[in-house]
Amino acid sequence: MVTYNPNLEELCATVRVIADQVSDIFVVDNTSTNFSPDWIDILNGDFVATLHILPQLDNLGIGAGQNIGIKQARMSGSDFVLLDQDSQVSVDMVTRLRAAYINLVRKGVSVAAVAPRYCDSDNGKLSSFVKAGLLSFTRLVCFTKNSVLEIDFLISSGSLLPLSVIETVGLMDEKLFIDHVDTEWYFRAKVKGYKLYGVCDAVMTHALGNRRKVVWFFRRRNVSFHSPIRYYYIFRNSILLYRRDYMPRNWKFADVTRCIMLLIFFGC
């Protein structure tokens, strides 16, 4: 879990749920101003997991924070790492993700990661999984609860990655700092022959953006609003990834379309 000025009440709630589903929890804190080691005293009860607090001297970003946690998980002898920082997971999410991974591997599939659907914390709507089309992103529908869908990329929150795959693909790109860290890693994994899957019956609650608002922009949209510096990284990192050969051409076209729409909408 990578934290930066987290809501401590929500963080504690996340720890309580996830602590009975994993062996260790590594909280990598990027110099939060509201963060202190004594927040752990808010927690009550005995957990299966061992909680490790890893305070940093500077805000290193999501990629570097995840890499610190991944290295610690590797040293602890873990087989998988679950990336998360701002979600409320269901009580059986990790079990469902791991079961889906094992079933796929038994079929001879090389799996880079499996991920849950997320329930929007603002409106309660369940997300769809996504593939990159020619000029836009195509949403895949879970027709049955037990479906497992091959997809193009995932959000990092809630994603379950085997450490053996990270050894082959490499760690997260720390230079990206925050946006597209997950996208870049997943496409790097796909180039090496791995596949990504969305698990329809694994669910978490996730917040997108600082706030949400329903607006009309060619159609009715529920738009996420981020801080200005976040939009800087969205555009900057997209441009950086367009220059990388292993990023698929259809993703580049679809992402250019997305960035143009963001520029027009927020520019207006």
Image (spheres, grey):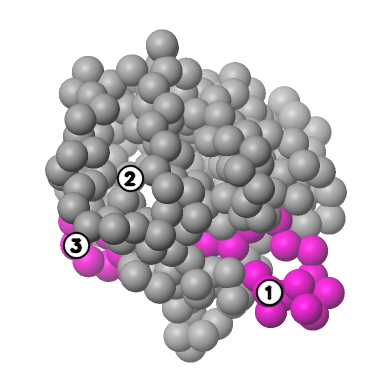
Nearer to the camera, 62 or 13: 13
Task: Using the rendered image of the protein, determine whether residue 118 is visible from the camera's viewpoint.
Answer: no
The residue to which callout 1 is attached is 102
Look at discs 1 and 2 and give the one toward the viewer. 1
- Which numbered tag is attached to residue 86? 2
Q: CA distance from mark 2 to mark 3?
A: 17 Å
Nearer to the camera, 17 or 51: 51
| Residue drawn at the location 32% of the way across and 27% of the way down | 4
Query: Left or right: where does residue 214 sit relative to residue 77?
Result: left
Query: Left or right: where does residue 192 sit relative to residue 260?
Result: right
The residue to which callout 3 is attached is 123
**Residue 147 lies in what quarter of the image?**
bottom right
Coordinates of residue 195 in the picture (x, y in percent): 73, 61
Look at discs 2 and 3 and give the one toward the viewer. 2
The answer to whether residue 114 is magenta is: yes
| Residue drawn at the location 29% of the way across and 58% of the way down | 46
Residue extent of the magenta highlight: 101-126
The type of residue carrying mark 3 is: Asn
Nearer to the camera, 103 or 178: 103
**N-terminal label among 3 and 1:** 1
| Residue drawn at the location 40% of the way across and 73% of the way down | 92
The answer to whether residue 180 is magenta is: no
Q: Residues within 10 Å of mark 2 (few under 14, many from 20)?
A: many
Query: Left or right: where does residue 24 sit relative to residue 193?
Result: left
Q: Is residue 87 above or below residue 32?
A: below
The type of residue carrying mark 2 is: Asp
SS at badge 3: loop
Task: Using the rendered image of the protein, determine whether residue 236 is visible from the camera's viewpoint.
Answer: yes
**Residue 101 lies in what quarter of the image?**
bottom right
